[in-house]
Amino acid sequence: MSLLKIVLVFCVIFAVSKFLKNWIALAIFSGALFSGLFFGHGIFGTLKSFFLGSVSQNAVFLALLVTLISIFSGVMEVTGTLERCKKASVGMFSSGRAAGVFMASLIGLLPMPGGALFSAPLVNSSIEGKNNPGLLTALNYWFRHVWEFWWPLYPAVITLLAVTGYGMVKWMVNTFVFSLIAVFLGWAFIYRKVRTTKIVKKHFRVDRETFSGFAPLLTVIVFAVLYKTALSFLGIDIQSELVIIPAVLLGILVCLKDWKKEMNPRKALNPGRIIPLAILIMTIMGYKKVIEDGGVAQAIALDIQNMNFPVIVVFTALPFIAGVITGIAIGFIGASFPLIIDMLGDFPQYSKTAVLVLSFGFGYAGMMLSPFHACILLSKEYFCSSWKDIYKYLAGPVAFLTAAFVLYYFLVSFVLNIK
């Protein structure tokens, strides 16, 4: 039975992830290997498919982009650009918790692996007052991830577009609203419960130092939007990665104007962070190729048809389970979306837009609740909080956000009838 085989594959991924938390790529590779073997692809056929997928043009471009984004984050940190962002943010708000949320969200624009450890001290320094450590952990963790649905610098979004062939602008239009919903839910369940003192601030003004702090991020955003708009106007359609790569390079160049001789290039490059992430990207693309060549999606679709099992359950359960297992967005996309996109071809009655957004929502929910997520682990360690307290504050917003994705699915599928 194909469904049972894929459950076993997920069990393998879970087992490997549990013991090798910092090397999710090995877990995905194990899943690819067992997928090929379970679905009759053979050991040599599986390894061949995996290799071809991992060194494909898409895989190389994705790995390059993720590497550049990691370098961008490191250069901003080493040159003090992020510290200037913090000073400017504190000057903009009259409340410490507002400044803390702004900093967590701002750092969240840069998809740094385990970046919550970087934003946690900034949040802690902005908020004054006695608060439950679990509440501060939830605040830092939640608001760091409110952009992850659509922000084009996130490797997860980039990988999703590459795996599904979905257009970047169309995806952003369909998912931006969930950032607004996430911010509202964070305010309702977390932000309002934070006790803080008022900041006695001087008259805030936008000066050269303030602008220099935000300049790299603004450069990336503005250039990417203008570049994509110009290409669309000229009728040129290129991969999303090739739109973001030059934008990130430009952002790095803007940061480098503040580089000083005494600064450590190795700290900015951080090979220990970059290499595993690049390998993970290539592993996911290899897994995608194994899934495609092994006919896994078609086999599962046939099972569902024979059992009269609601396919929508598969579209939601697979990414949720993968999110819990891997604890990272790029992980649940890599583990489940190759299956989902192939299965959609066998069920044309389902709206591609509605299913992809719904599947992403359930994967996101699993990721946010995952005890393997680096951000929650690092935040927990920094604030010395308990799992009970953390989940007490996260359960509400995750549940209501998931409900919003379900509502979106029914609205798009049955009211707007968008394919």
Image (spheres, rainbow, N blue to C red):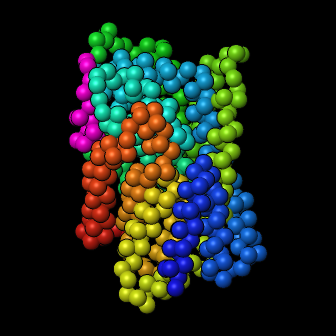
The answer to whether 17 is drawn above or below residue 253 in the figure is below
Write the start and end of the magenta stretch as one range: 186-198
Residue 224 seen from this side: no
At 75% across and 71% down in the image, what residue appears? 48
Magenta residue check for 5: no
Residue 170: quarter of image: bottom left
Is 189 left, or right, of 339 in this rendering? Answer: left
The answer to whether 31 is drawn above or below residue 172 in the figure is below
Magenta residue check for 194: yes
The answer to whether 205 is drawn above or below residue 148 in the figure is above
In the rendered image, residue 121, in percent from the top left (x then y), is placed at 45, 26
| Viewer-nearest residue: 222 or 92 | 92
- Quarter of the image with the C terminus is bottom left
Residue 220 seen from this side: yes
In the rendered image, residue 197, in percent from the top left (x then y), is placed at 26, 19
Is 309 left, or right, of 79 in this rendering? Answer: left
The tally of labels here is 0
Residue 387: quarter of image: top left
At 62% across and 81% down in the image, what residue appears? 39
In the rendered image, residue 27, in percent from the top left (x then y), is placed at 61, 60
User: Extreme bottom residue here?
Assistant: 306
At 56% across and 62% down in the image, what residue appears? 15
In the rendered image, residue 388, in percent from the top left (x then y), is placed at 33, 46
At 32% across and 9% down in the image, what residue appears? 202
